């Protein structure tokens, strides 16, 4: 795994510091500084490990999409940690959802971002081998993991036509 350049790493660290300063200014709350690691794999840009207070970033996607990471991914993952620190799991009657009301409110109030659960980055460099399947809608690609599960008897259903996917 090749890490982003030293300049990119410095920019990411600086953006995290800037985000933490915004949180302190806007919320009058000083959160603990999260550990920033570059161990996220696959098509995911980043994840927040709540109990470990860690933000994991995908180094491959970061190298090619620095602007998106600085503007969206770092605030996105930091908001997950903040929601955990401020609200915990919520209650049984009102659980805290990963991209729920509390998260959206923090994204907007602190960073002025609408926030989205998914990114739109090109993942072709990090996408693993895919297998062709078919439904009424047309061809569908499945990952190695899902293909192996199909081989073990799991059935996947198309989200659009609700037909089970068949190997092409």
Image (cartoon, rainbow, N blue to C red):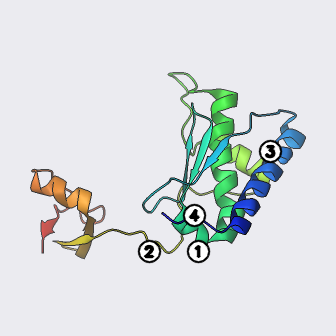
Name the mark on residue 125.
2
CA separation in Å, label 1 and label 3:
24 Å
Nearer the observer, 143 or 137: 143
Q: Nearer the viewer, mark 4 or mark 2?
A: 4
Q: Quadrant of the C terminus?
A: bottom left
CA separation in Å, label 4 and label 1:
12 Å
Disc 2 is placed on an element classified as loop
Q: Residue at x 50, y 54 (%)?
A: 40
| Number of disc labels | 4
Q: Residue at x 53, y 29 (%)?
A: 95
Name the mark on residue 20.
3
Asked whether the residues under the numbered discs 1 and 2 touch, taking CB atoms below 8 Å apart as contact, a structural biologist would say yes
Name the mark on residue 3.
4
Of the image marks 4 and 1, the number of the one nearer the N terminus: 4
Q: Residue at x 70, y 52 (%)?
A: 75
Disc 1 is placed on an element classified as helix
Q: Which residue is mark 1?
A: 64
CA separation in Å, label 3 and label 4:
23 Å
Disc 3 is placed on an element classified as helix
**Res. 157 visible in picture:** no
In this rendering, is residue 28 above or below 16?
above
In this rendering, is residue 49 above or below 18?
above
CA separation in Å, label 1 and label 2:
10 Å
Apparent side of residue 3 relative to residue 129 in the rendered image (left or right): right
Of the image marks 3 and 4, the number of the one nearer the N terminus: 4
Apparent side of residue 111 relative to residue 4 in the rendered image (left or right): right
Neighbourhood count class around disc 2 (C-alpha, 10 Å): few under 14, some 14–19, many 20 upward: few
Neighbourhood count class around disc 3 (C-alpha, 10 Å): few under 14, some 14–19, many 20 upward: many
């Amino acid at each position: 795994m090749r890490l982003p350049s030293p300049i990119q790493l410095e920019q990411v660290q600086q953006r995290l510091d800037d985000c933490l300063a915004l949180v302190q200014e806007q919320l009058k709350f000083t959160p603990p500084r999260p550990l920033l690691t570059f161990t996220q794999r696959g098509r995911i840009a980043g994840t927040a490990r709540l109990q470990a207070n860690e933000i994991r970033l995908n180094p491959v996607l970061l190298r090619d999409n620095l602007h998106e990471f600085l503007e969206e991914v770092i605030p996105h993952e930091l908001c997950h940690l903040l929601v955990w620190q401020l609200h915990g799991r919520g209650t049984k009657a009102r659980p805290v959802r990963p991209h729920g009301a509390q998260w959206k409110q923090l994204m907007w109030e602190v960073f002025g971002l609408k926030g989205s659960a998914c990114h739109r980055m090109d993942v072709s460099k990090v996408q693993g081998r895919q297998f062709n399947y078919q439904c009424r809608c047309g061809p569908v690609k499945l990952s190695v993991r899902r293909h192996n599960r199909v081989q073990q008897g799991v059935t996947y259903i198309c989200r659009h036509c609700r037909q089970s996917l068949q190997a092409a």
